[in-house]
Image (cartoon, grey):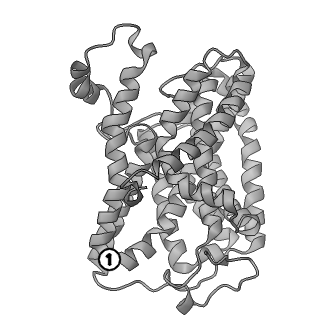
């Protein structure tokens, strides 16, 4: 049975916070569940708001659907995958310390590489080939489509939502190479340090926003490196937060986060969510998004800074909120935690199937999104539970 770490538990001394000794932080597991559910809701919103790219869409672009759908997607995009990478990175150093380079890389290849290859070269081609809308009755023979046509038109690897698994695998490999180059045999000590002050956090957010703005001078929002399906305009944030996750583990910042800092940055994150509307109105978003996606435009700079401050606000604020209010697990939350990774892997298939099943239901798009969400989330976790019961899946899932 997991020992629960609560806010009343004193922060361990440096000698006591080695990964083998500390309790599992249940709030991190619960955050992973939340982020997995957010990913499901995010992609379903693409289906029904008609903004973005998915296997199947049906959103009606009236003003309310378009505005609220875009707001939901943009706000989530600003922070949730960066936060996912941060908490994923938090688990990397301890795993490497316990296993060493060889076993660490082998486990990463099994746990990340096998699902990545299976989705990229089996599941996604099957989804696209089975899509009646894409082919309009002129579907080519399977051997004509795959592999030649598929590999010409689609990413080589990392297709669909599995870009995140690909990115995590790449970042983990780079970390392992860095550890081999700098400390080939030594376990890096974990040391308690004070959580950064508000001024340092604000400066980091400023630099993060400026970095995003500079990247988007050449690679505007919407750019995708097709062979690997990676959206490099967001990678200044992703790289920075992965590194922050590594540092956070070594310095015990998750337990050292002061409540006053957490509350402040959660408030900043919430304020930034609502500042989206003044920003897009002042920047002329009604005439199109071109001024916001990149280039030497004040709107692009303001958007990159808004994104960075929202990201830091929500990352810090949600860590505080989950540590304060969700640092426990019951039967349901434990079930969700165990099945979150598999749910992420299969959610693309599941929500596409749900959307197809509901295509004849006539509802306002946002209401239909809510109905599809109520069906898709339990189905993703329920099917994950069944998949994980199959022989040999325990090593991967």
Front residue of 343/272: it is 343
- Across and down, in percent, residue 303 comes to 61, 42
Q: Looking at the rendering, which quadrant does residue 285 occupy? A: top right
Q: Looking at the rendering, which quadrant does residue 178 occupy? A: bottom left
- Across and down, in percent, residue 119 comes to 37, 40
The kind of secondary structure element at disc 1 is helix
- Across and down, in percent, residue 366 comes to 72, 26
Q: What residue do we see at 33% from left, 69% from top?
A: 104
Q: What residue do we see at 38% from left, 7% from top?
A: 137
Quadrant where the C terminus is found in the figure:
bottom left
Left/right placement of residue 255 relative to residue 153 reads right
- Across and down, in percent, residue 339 comes to 54, 53
Q: Is residue 225 visible?
A: yes
Relative height, residue 290 to residue 247 (above, below): above
Q: What residue do we see at 29% from left, 84% from top?
A: 185
Residue pointed to by mark 1: 100
Q: What residue do we see at 76% from left, 65% from top?
A: 325
Q: Residues within 10 Å of mark 1 (few under 14, many from 20)?
A: some
């Amino acid at each position: 049975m997991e020992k629960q770490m609560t806010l009343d538990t004193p922060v361990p001394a440096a000698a006591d916070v080695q990964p083998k000794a500390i309790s599992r932080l249940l709030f991190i597991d619960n955050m992973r569940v939340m982020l997995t559910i957010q990913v499901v809701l995010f992609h379903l919103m693409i289906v029904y708001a008609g903004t973005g790219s998915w296997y199947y869409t049906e959103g009606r672009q009236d003003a309310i659907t378009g505005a609220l759908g875009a707001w939901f997607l943009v706000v989530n995009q600003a922070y949730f995958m960066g936060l996912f990478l941060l908490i994923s990175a938090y688990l990397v150093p301890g795993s490497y310390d316990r296993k060493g380079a060889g076993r660490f890389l082998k486990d990463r290849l099994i746990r990340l590489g096998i699902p990545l290859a299976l989705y990229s070269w089996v599941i996604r081609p099957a989804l696209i080939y089975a899509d009646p809308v894409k082919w309009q009755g002129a579907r080519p023979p399977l051997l004509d489509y795959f592999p030649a046509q598929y590999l010409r038109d689609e990413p080589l690897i990392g297709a669909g939502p599995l870009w995140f698994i690909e990115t995590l695998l790449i970042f983990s490999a780079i970390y392992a190479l860095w550890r081999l180059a700098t400390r080939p045999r030594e376990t890096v000590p974990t040391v308690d340090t004070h959580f950064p002050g508000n001024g340092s956090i604000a400066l980091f957010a400023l630099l993060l926003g400026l970095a995003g703005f500079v990247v988007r001078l050449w690679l505007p929002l919407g750019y995708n490196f097709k062979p690997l399906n990676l959206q490099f305009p967001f990678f200044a944030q992703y790289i920075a937060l992965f590194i922050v996750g590594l540092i956070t583990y070594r310095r015990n910042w998750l337990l050292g986060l002061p409540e006053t800092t957490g509350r402040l940055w959660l408030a900043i994150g919430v304020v930034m969510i609502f500042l989206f509307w003044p920003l897009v109105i002042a920047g002329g978003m009604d005439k199109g998004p071109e001024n916001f996606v990149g280039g030497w435009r004040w709107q692009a700079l303001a958007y990159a800074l808004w994104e960075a401050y929202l990201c830091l606000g929500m990352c810090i604020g949600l860590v505080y909120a989950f540590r304060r209010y969700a640092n426990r697990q019951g039967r349901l939350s434990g079930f969700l935690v165990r099945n979150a990774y598999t749910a992420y892997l299969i959610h693309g298939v599941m929500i596409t199937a749900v959307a197809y099943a509901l295509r004849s239901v006539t509802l306002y798009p946002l209401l239909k999104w809510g109905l599809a969400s109520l069906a898709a989330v339990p189905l993703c976790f329920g099917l994950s539970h069944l998949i994980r019961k199959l022989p040999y899946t325990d090593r991967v899932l």
